[in-house]
Image (cartoon, coloured by chain):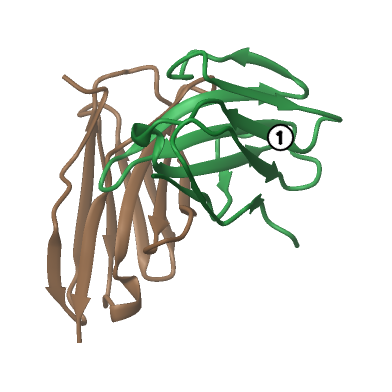
Chain colours: A green, B brown
Amino acid sequence: GAGVSQSPSNKVTEKGKDVELRCDPISGHTALYWYRQSLGQGLEFLIYFQGNSAPDKSGLPSDRFSAERTGGSVSTLTIQRTQQEDSAVYLCASSSGSPAQYFGPGTRLLVL
Amino acid sequence: QKEVEQDPGPLSVPEGAIVSLNCTYSNSAFQYFMWYRQYSRKGPELLMYTYSSGNKEDGRFTAQVDKSSKYISLFIRDSQPSDSATYLCAMSDYNDMRFGAGTRLTVKP
């Protein structure tokens, strides 16, 4: 079956521009997670959705970061006024009634 | 002290060796334990998922959890060059998931 998909796979942008990253979870998975992974670093939790609501936004690093989920399915992570330190791989994961999370391939963001 | 400690390696072994990867943790509330494999420029892939203490075997992979010592291990038997990847441990109390930093493994032919 189809796994978690993310788009774009790569994104190069200029400092100060806004970017939108998309995640399409596994069908039927109610929980959706966003993480950030910097080169050689572990996974940094950003935000968690249960259905369309986000009970845990504690990981968002600044108010430039926001995320939404519509229809209990697709989620978009938006980074406004991008900075060079935002360069990283942004990973999305989904799960359904289990702590095990299933990850997408990630979006590689490079801010010049 | 981090909640989850994992030696980042790198770890290099010859083909056919037994590999042992380990994590320690501090939160005794963790009940669910996972190992993920992440190939270069790919997302993490769930390898093993166990609940509470004990062993779980899947082919060449064995996951071991010792809750009394707060220590988990992943053993890879007859390691292959295709096992070369970064291995991340993860653990959860159902509500919160915590990941190790990952151990980079290279299996040399």
Kind of residue at disc 1: Ser
Q: Crowding near pointer 1: few (<14 within 10 Å), some, many (20+)? A: many
Question: At 45% from the left edge and 15% from the top edge, which residue is drawn?
Answer: A62
Q: Which quarter of the image is occupied by the C terminus of chain B? A: bottom left
Could you tell me which chain the residue with mark 1 belongs to? A
> To which residue does mark 1 refer?
A75
Image quadrant in which you'd find residue B10: bottom left
Residue B103 point in image, percent of width and height: 23, 52
Image quadrant in which you'd find residue B14: bottom left
Front position in the image: A85 or B95: A85
Residue B16 point in image, percent of width and height: 21, 81
Question: At 27% from the left edge and 75% from the top edge, which residue is drawn?
Answer: B79
Q: Please say if B106 is above or below A11.
A: below
Q: Helix or strand or loop: what does disc 1 sit on? A: strand
Question: At 39% from the left edge and 41% from the top edge, which residue is drawn?
Answer: A87
Residue B36 point in image, percent of width and height: 42, 51
The tally of labels here is 1
Q: Please say if A2 is above or below A6.
A: below
Front position in the image: B86 or A68: A68
Residue A80 point in image, percent of width and height: 55, 25
